[in-house]
Image (spheres, rainbow, N blue to C red):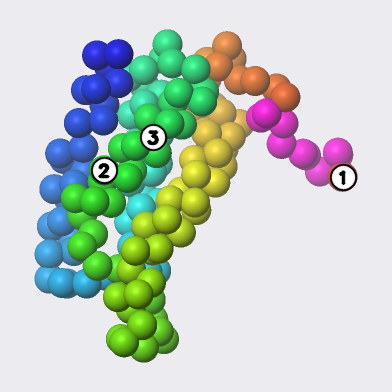
Amino acid sequence: MTNQILSVNDLGDLVTKAKEILNAAKTVAMPQAWKVLQLATAEVVQNIENNNPSLKGADKKTLAMTMISNFYDQVFTIVNFPFVPKLLQPIIQRYVKQILMLLISATIDALVTTFRNSGIFSNPNSVDPTTDKVSSISDK
């Protein structure tokens, strides 16, 4: 449990770097927020895999989602949708994080599968063949 707590709170460098990059903007457009979140997600997934090898896959994903949610709360104050009138922006603002977190959940699954298939996560004990089956060209 100590490793989990340390991992969740160990976002300092990542948050600092993101804030430096986004410092000039008071608001961030959805595409830019999504790009930053994808990079943060890859970093968090690798951090969890390296620092919490004893966790099960579902626990790792829960931890990753918590860390990304904390990252979002610390980095983004307002995320704007292009082409949405400013009058409607405050109404959809409360749903922006929910939408992005749904996308992040799928991104985590894709990243883990990609990292395992490319050898970045080389621990074969952590691979569940029933959930990590990626169809190859010969399967189609």
Q: Nearer the viewer, mark 1 or mark 2?
A: 2
Answer above or below: position of 120 versus 31: above
Which comes sooner in the sequence, label 1 or label 2? 2
Check residue 64 in the rendering and tell me which mark sits there, or answer none: 3
Element type at marker 3? helix
Check residue 140 in the rendering and tell me which mark sits there, or answer none: 1
Amino acid at circle 2:
Asn
Q: Nearer the viewer, mark 3 or mark 1?
A: 3
Answer above or below: position of 32 versus 16: below
Residue at image location 15% in from the left, 56% down from the top = 19
Instruction: Tell me where the magenta segment starts and ends, as one range.
Output: 131-139
Left or right for 74, reference 110: left
Residue at image location 32% in from the left, 56% down from the top = 36
For the residues labelled 1 and 2, say whether their Cβ atoms are less than 8 Å apart: no
Which comes sooner in the sequence, label 3 or label 1? 3
Q: Nearer the viewer, residue 95 or 49?
A: 95
Q: What kind of secondary structure does the magenta stretch mostly adopt? A: loop
Q: CA distance from mark 3 to mark 1?
A: 32 Å
